[in-house]
Each structure stands twice: as structure tokens, then as C-alpha cells.
């Protein structure tokens, strides 16, 4: 089966080989306080910074999931109150999770076809942390690098945290435009679930030191102190870190990956013309390049998904209230060109 599900999605073909290498090299048995693990951690952070263009003075950490990152941000970085801006289900989930922890989180929503323009945002003066979902997996929208830069310029004193779960490693992100970025690896990284990457600016690190929260096993300050020794606060997903290292070593620089992502996006969109299907989002300026939501009549969508599966193609279900009349197509780097061709041929012939 060819999976276009937007996460967990298709893993890189080399994963079985890398797992075998990890076993044969004893990686699966190394102690997380050993020299071998510290060398692996150091090398993985270095290759991530190189391939993704992460600023040298930014810190890279490993967590179990993007959801854990919600918790870390809420417990270790928010001084008094966070303000969440979202237009979809995952932004809302982040807000609701934070609200359960801090009880002071506030939010506002915007339409899926609206660009998140800095002048239209009114962040309360007492909010010290702004939370934005850069790429909304549920509805296939994104907030561009330029818009994030404008927001940062308008609110220079506010710590900005970004959910880039379904875009990091698939498109170029300008990390200097925010203070915290995070992503799970089961999407554009092309890896099995169970690991996330969290990236923090020096300002975010200083905020964690200022708040001095060390009461939890995953307190950010404790994570910071341990990563300085290339270690983790607790036994980590060593296999996941090793696979991340190997996959990123084999990846081209992110600007090259982004060109591939853009080209494939155009090819997939061209199949929707005169098909009875359309992109869920009308505003082309805010469409995600990595998650493509396709809309049509309920019975038509159901038939297409069923027929696709019969031909060995797994399309992602629509999310939440969009389930009945949409499906989603993952446009992630691990998907092969030949598989994109198979998908586009199916869509052209069936629709």
C-alpha cells in the first residue's frame, strides 16, 4: 500500500536497513549516559542544524511527541498567560491542553481563508507567550515565514512558540522568526512515531532559566542542563534519535527539499482541475505545501477513498467535521516520485 496519510505517514525506504545497522552496532543497548550516546546526540543535533538551517545559537532538544512539547511550553515557558491564535483542530487542541495546565490561556480564531496579518492581531498586553500553528494538519493551511516575521516585529517582547509538526523538514522555516519550534518525526522527517524535535532560541532558554521550573521530569530547564552534556533527563528513544541521524545524513539541504515539495504540490493540484474535486482552501496564499485537503460531495469522496484503497493507495481521511466531504494528501519528502505519479494517474483516471 502507498500511504498518503498525513501522519503517521510513509517512512523512508532505508528505515529497515538503519534498524538492522542499529542492532548490529549495539546502538539499541547503549547506556544513555555513555560516551557513545553523547556522541550520537551531538552528531544528530549538528546534522539537524546543517540540513534545516537552524541558527547556530539555537538549542535542539528531543522529546517524545509534539503533545509533550505543549506540556513543556505550558509548564516551563509561560510566565502568566499565553495567547493562542488558530484556525483548525490542532491549534485548538494545543490551546485546550495549555488551558488545562495554566487555566489562564486565552485564544482567538481566524478563518481558513484569511492570512494571519500582523496588523489584524490584537494580543493582550499581559500575554507573555504567543502560540501559533504554522501548518494546520486538519485543514491544510499555513502561516508563511513572512507573516511570522511581521508578527515578531509587531510583538518583539512576546515569546513566540510555533507548531511546525507537519511542515518541519518538508519546507524551509526561518527559525529566527520565533523562539520555540517543535515537530513530531512521523510526518516530513519520514520516521516512525515516538520522537519529536524541539528548537529554542537563546531568549526561550533564558525564559526557562528565569522561571526556574525543575519540578517535573521534563522541565525545560532540566532538559537544557542535560543537553549541554549531550544527554537527556531520562532514558530517551535512542532508536528514534539514531534513525533521525541516519535519515538527515541522507537528506539534501532543506532548500532543495522545499523545491521538490513545491513541484509535487503543483503536480497534485493540477489533477483536481475539471475533476469534480477542489482544494478545501480557496485562498492560494495560505495553502499548506505539505498537506493538501481535497473537497467534494460526500458520496464522491467516499467512493474515491474506497477505490483508491482497492488500487493500493491510502488517502488520509478528512479531520473532524471535515471527515465526510474531504480527504487529505500528504506531500512529504519520504514519498517517492513514482508514488506521486501513481496517485496523479489514479485521480486523473477516476475523476
Image (tube, grey):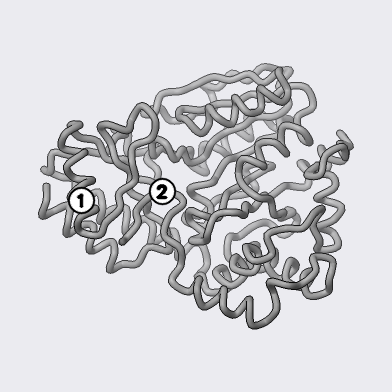
Which secondary structure, mark 1?
A: helix
The answer to whether residue 246 is above or below residue 102 is below
The answer to whether residue 236 is above or below residue 329 is below
Residue shown at 10% from the left, 55% from the top: 349
Residue shown at 62% from the left, 47% from the top: 65
Identify the mark nearer the N-term, 2 or 1: 2
Tag shown at residue 286? none
Residue shown at 48% from the left, 47% from the top: 166
Task: Judge depth for marks 2 and 1 and give the one in front.
Answer: 2
Residue 173 on image: x %, y %:
54, 51
Residue 98 on image: x %, y %:
66, 27
Task: Pick whichever, 76 or 172, lies toward us.
Answer: 76
Task: Pick whichever, 202 or 194, lies toward us.
Answer: 194
Which residue extends farthest bottom? 24
Distance from disc 2 to disc 1, alpha carbons, whole Å, reads: 20 Å
Residue 138 on image: x %, y %:
42, 36
The answer to whether residue 246 is above or below residue 322 is below
From the viewer's perspective, tell me whether residue 110 is left or right of residue 183.
left
Which secondary structure, mark 2?
A: loop
Residue marked by disc 1: 270
Task: Determine the image quadrant of residue 29.
Answer: bottom right
Residue 137 on image: x %, y %:
44, 40
Residue marked by disc 2: 6
Residue shown at 53% from the left, 46% from the top: 165
CB-based contact (under 8 Å), mark 2 and mark 1: no
From the viewer's perspective, tell me whether residue 86 is left or right of residue 50.
left
Task: Determine the image quadrant of residue 217.
Answer: top right
Count numbered badges in the picture: 2
The answer to whether residue 19 is above or below residue 240 is below
Mark 1 surroundings: few (<14), some (14-19) or many (≥20) residues within 10 A: few
From the viewer's perspective, tell me whether residue 184 is left or right of residue 209.
left
Q: Quadrant of the N terminus?
A: bottom left
Amino acid at each position: 500500500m502507498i500511504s498518503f496519510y498525513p501522519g503517521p505517514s510513509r517512512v523512508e525506504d532505508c528505515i529497515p536497513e538503519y534498524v538492522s545497522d542499529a542492532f548490529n552496532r549495539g546502538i539499541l543497548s547503549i547506556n544513555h549516559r555513555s560516551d557513545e550516546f553523547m556522541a550520537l546526540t551531538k552528531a544528530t543535533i549538528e546534522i539537524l542544524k546543517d540540513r534545516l538551517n537552524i541558527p547556530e545559537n539555537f538549542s535542539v532538544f528531543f522529546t517524545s511527541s509534539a503533545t509533550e512539547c505543549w506540556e513543556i511550553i505550558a509548564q516551563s515557558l509561560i510566565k502568566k498567560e499565553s495567547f493562542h491564535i488558530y484556525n483548525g483542530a490542532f491549534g485548538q487542541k494545543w490551546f485546550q491542553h495549555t488551558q488545562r495546565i495554566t487555566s489562564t490561556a486565552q485564544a482567538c480564531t481566524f478563518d481558513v481563508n484569511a492570512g494571519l496579518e500582523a496588523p489584524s492581531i490584537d494580543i493582550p498586553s499581559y500575554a507573555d507567550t504567543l502560540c501559533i500553528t504554522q501548518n494546520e494538519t486538519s485543514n491544510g493551511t499555513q502561516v508563511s515565514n513572512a507573516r511570522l516575521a511581521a508578527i515578531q516585529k509587531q510583538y518583539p517582547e512576546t515569546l513566540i512558540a510555533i507548531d511546525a509538526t507537519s511542515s518541519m523538514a518538508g519546507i524551509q522555516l526561518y527559525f529566527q522568526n520565533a523562539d520555540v519550534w517543535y515537530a513530531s518525526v512521523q510526518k516530513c522527517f519520514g520516521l516512525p512515531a515516538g520522537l519529536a524535535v524541539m528548537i529554542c532560541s537563546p531568549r526561550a532558554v533564558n525564559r526557562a532559566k528565569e522561571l526556574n521550573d525543575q519540578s517535573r521530569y521534563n522541565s525545560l530547564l532540566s532538559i537544557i542542563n542535560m543537553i549541554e552534556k549531550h544527554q537527556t533527563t531520562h532514558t530517551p528513544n535512542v532508536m528514534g534519535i539514531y534513525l533521525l541521524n541516519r535519515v538527515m545524513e541522507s537528506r539534501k539541504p532543506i532548500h532543495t527539499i522545499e523545491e521538490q515539495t513545491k513541484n509535487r504540490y503543483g503536480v497534485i493540484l493540477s489533477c483536481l482541475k475539471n475533476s469534480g474535486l477542489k482544494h478545501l482552501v480557496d485562498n492560494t496564499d495560505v495553502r499548506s505545501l505539505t498537506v493538501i485537503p481535497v473537497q467534494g460531495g460526500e458520496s464522491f469522496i467516499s467512493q474515491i477513498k474506497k477505490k483508491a484503497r482497492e488500487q493500493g493507495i491510502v488517502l488520509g481521511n478528512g479531520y473532524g467535521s471535515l471527515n465526510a466531504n474531504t480527504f487529505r494528501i500528504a506531500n512529504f519528502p519520504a514519498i517517492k516520485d513514482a508514488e506521486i505519479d501513481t496517485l496523479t494517474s489514479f485521480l486523473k483516471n477516476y475523476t
